[in-house]
Image (cartoon, rainbow, N blue to C red):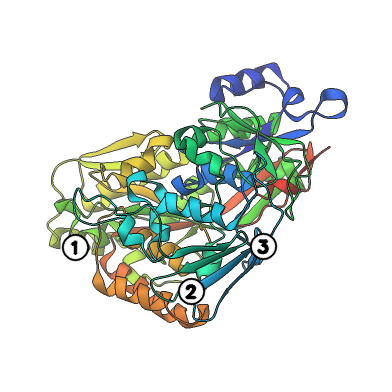
Amino acid sequence: MTVVSKARGAAVFLAAALALSACGGSGGSGGDTGGGDQGPKRFSVALTEPDHLTPGNTSSSYSITVLQALFDTLVVIGPDGTAQMRAAESVTSKDQKTWTIKIKPGQKFHNGEEVTAGSFADAWNAAAYGPNAWTNNYYFANVEGYDKLNPEAEGAKPSTDKLSGLKVVDPVTLEVRLTAPFSQFPITLAYTGFAPMPKAAFADLKAYDQKPIGNGPFALDGEWQHNRQIALKKFDGYAGPRAAKADGVLFKIYASRDTAYTDLRAGKVDLLQTIPPASAPEAKRLLGERFVPTASGTMDYLGFPVFDKRFQSADLRKAVSMAIDRQAIVDAVFNGAFKPMSSLVAPLVPGYREGACGETCVYDPAKAKALYDKAGGLSGTLNLYFSNADPSYEQWMTAVANQLKQNLGVADIKFRKIPAADYLSTLRAKKEDGPYRNNWVMDYPSPQNYLESMWGAGNRMGWENKEFTDLIAQANAAPSMEASIPLYQRAEDVALAEMPMIPLWNWQDQAGYSANVTGVAIDAYSPNLDTISVK
């Protein structure tokens, strides 16, 4: 996944002009949030433009922030990191290979359709069907029949569009047969890629992506106005456990988080989930208790296109890692709020080991240069890729470029800044020809979510390692999370030894909200928009 930003601000003329020019959003707070006699009470959240709004077709956190309000998944991750039932009544298995999911009866989609076991099976089949080319396709690779929907032979067409491992037993019972035991299957169901879809969606999937119909506490209110706003309204037919407290949510789409923060200070946006690090000290002083620091599962990395022969040397990749002064960048760009990392998984995740990377993640310019020269160095221009979603991306990439010039002698470095909405598709298509900013927002607290999702089959680096793959398979088949941890750690060691992607730092989210709202309950897993009330 990628990263999100959000916000809220006042009715000063200059601030209004800034908001209009930055996001094309609607003007002052009166029309957006309401209150008293001003109409429906809805609050506003700052957002970067999503890429898609079909649950199976996006891993962007900009999209997921919206989808978490529109959809109820089978399971959710509670504030304590444990799995809790949501749309499911139970998820059980005797052998961890065949799972029975019981759906809570009485749930409805926003168009009035019943939410059934078939609603989940239909959505999962669509995501797993190779020709659809949906982002979350690989999440279903361990369900029986996936290979038939995704034949490896070039030009081969799938022989079916249904996963044989999904069986709708009755309207409230879905049986899932996996290719191997997977003890962490229940917790994966918290990810939005496993959300259900109504039958109406399949009449026109392209149209559905623009106007999704979910089963959550909020429903879409009008059209997705690209690069401007996405409006949601409270779903009165919602029968789940998290009925919305507000009448609606207005996602204001910003090109810059700095502008979103300006609006938060001015009272024109109610929630900014990620305050720019440079503004955090001021925000803490101005907002007081409305400044909310939260431990995060989000990590930043520098990935290598190892399919490019220039980056196939592990020594070269390690040299780049040792040439980067993580602490200096964290201090300069993030005001020291982030934590330099030498592990591939975040501290929130079971099995995290501080220092797992060893000396390869320790800043040592002399050793870096020696290793770089041993590897033969780099020829030609070094292109560094990142998106335009946040000014801090270019700031830290500039610092990395300067350190590589100074410590390794890389003379010719150019930036490739990609629009946020196109960035992930650029990486998925392997169009990058140089190191790229990659980050991961935790879907669920398991090492598997980091390791297999980013270093496993179909990864963006083009990296392959049989020992890594075998260890992940063994860890997935372990009888419990506790039993799986040592195996995931061994897999992490294999990846770190080859360094196809460099761990940089772990985020601490720093959110802020306006005096216009109450009940803000942000945790590492969700902004919990349903708990927010408008004064």
Q: Which residue is mark 3?
A: 79
**Is 503 left or right of 462, judged from the image as shown?**
right
**What is the distance, in whole Å, between disc 3 and disc 2 at their CAs?**
28 Å
- Tell me if mark 3 has few (under 14), some (14-19) or many (20+) residues whose alpha carbon lies within 10 angstroms of its own: few
Please state which of residues 84 and 267 is positioned toward the viewer in this rendering.
84
Dot 2 amino acid type: Thr
Q: Looking at the rendering, which quadrant does residue 470 occupy? A: bottom left
Q: Earlier in the sequence, mark 3 or mark 1?
A: 3
Q: Please, is residue 330 above or below residue 251 in the view?
A: below
**Is 109 left or right of 176, judged from the image as shown?**
right
Q: Which mark is residue 98?
A: 2
Give the SS element for disc 1. Answer: helix
Q: Which mark is residue 370?
A: 1
**Is 306 left or right of 16, judged from the image as shown?**
left
- Dot 3 and dot 1 residues touching (CB under 8 Å): no
**What is the distance, in whole Å, between disc 1 and disc 2 at their CAs?**
52 Å
**Is 221 left or right of 404, judged from the image as shown?**
right
Give the SS element for disc 2. Answer: strand
Residue 315: x %, y % from top left = 20, 63
**What is the distance, in whole Å, between disc 3 and disc 1 at their CAs?**
46 Å
Q: Looking at the rendering, which quadrant does residue 263 occupy? A: top right
Q: How many marks?
A: 3
Query: Please, which residue is most extreme toward the right here?
Result: 36
Q: Earlier in the sequence, mark 1 or mark 2?
A: 2
Residue 508: x %, y % from top left = 57, 55
